[in-house]
Image (tube, grey):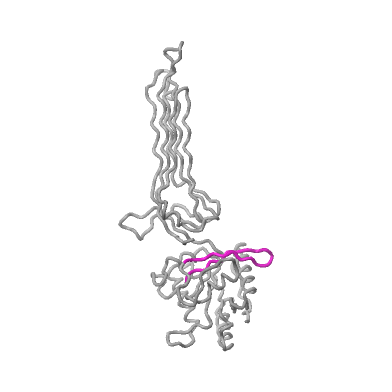
Amino acid sequence: MKFIDEAVIHVQAGKGGAGSRHFRREKFVPLGGPDGGNGGRGGSVILRADANIHTLLDFKFQAEWKAEDGSAGAGSQKDGKAGEDIVIKLPVGTQVFVAPAQDQEHESGELVVDLDVVGREFVIAKGGRGGKGNSFFKTATNQAPEYAQPGEQGEAGSYLLSLKLVADVGLVGFPNAGKSTLISRISAAKPKIADYPFTTLVPNLGVVQAKGKRTFVVADIPGLIPGASEGKGLGIRFLKHVERTKVIAHLLDLTQLDEKGEEADLEQLFDSINHELASFSDELAQRQQIVVLTKVDAVSSQERVVHYRDLFQKRGHHVVVISSVVGTGVPELIEIFADHVDVIRAGEGQVESGPAETS
């Protein structure tokens, strides 16, 4: 399924049914009074966060959503039937904004609702009220009112849907850092994996199970590069998906080379990615990070492993050395993820850095 994380929709609630202008007419009651019933209310448009929906793709093909109109009232004080509501199922994590004006295509308007919890509902367009029938207007001084109300128009509007994935752990790092391989190893997610940059073009979600039947969700965020916060590479389009994560796992490839073909400075790469996170969001820059040194199976010198393990440990980070290919360190990493997520879910703050994991 193609991943789409933005779409614009137009919603129209149903119009209320008209009230009835009707007078009682029976064989022996030639001057019967007014008995027009009320019109039914129009259907509303309701948004619902659904755990089974994962992309906004369908809304690229169906942008118009209209609820049913209410039925008109009838004689004998029969009220019209209410129009059916329409429920639009959206992925959990969808934010709904007032759609931007035509001349402000790249700017979003006011946030209307954040559907960040499964089952959360929001009435985005309320159906119009049905009109009152003429029997409603009968008074002591007006025994035969000729007037009946028309139904009210339902609310309408255009809205920008913007999906931010809801995950417990976000995997970030340069392209080819091993994020896709890791998520495929620890979950049932099957991202495309290849040995060239930007293999992953969309975020991938995977559910991971740790010991004690603990589960958490991991998001594989497409590779970041310097300038991502300004739109370079895959740009800010995917930085937003990191915002909801409780923990950031920062993956660094121990085998990565620089432009000269020499071993890359992993601390410099680490700081470069964090600069992009900080440029995008001050709060995101303060998010807890676990440093994951990957591809240890392909490293010939253990000195490089020990150097960076100790370096990031001294900087206050929990460090784990892994190989997703052969499985080294992966079970330990899963438990560390689960422990951090459990503590944060419980509102107890951050887990203190423990001793660095060895390969």
Residue at 39%, 21% (x, y): give it.
Answer: 145
* Name of the residue lying farthest toward the right: 212
Q: Position of residue 341 (x, y in %)?
A: 60, 66
Q: Position of residue 204 (x, y in %)?
A: 52, 66
Q: Position of residue 30 (x, y in %)?
A: 42, 12
Between 282 and 2, the one nearer to me in the picture: 2
Asked if 14 appears above or below 21 in the picture, the reply is below
Magenta stretch contains residue 289 = no
Magenta stretch contains residue 219 = yes
| Side of 106 where 261 appears, left or right | right
| Side of 147 where 195 appears, left or right | right
Between 263 and 192, the one nearer to me in the picture: 192
Between 344 and 251, the one nearer to me in the picture: 251
* Name of the residue lying farthest toward the top: 28
Asked if 229 appears above or below 12 in the picture, the reply is below
Q: Quadrant of the C terminus?
A: bottom right
Q: Position of residue 112 (x, y in %)?
A: 44, 52
Q: How many marks?
A: 0
Q: Is residue 37 visible?
A: yes
Asked if 346 appears above or below 223 in the picture, the reply is above
**Magenta-colored span:** 202-222
For residue 229, which quarter of the picture?
bottom left
Residue at 60%, 62% (x, y): give it.
Answer: 345
Residue at 45%, 60% (x, y): give it.
Answer: 5
Q: Is residue 343 visible?
A: no
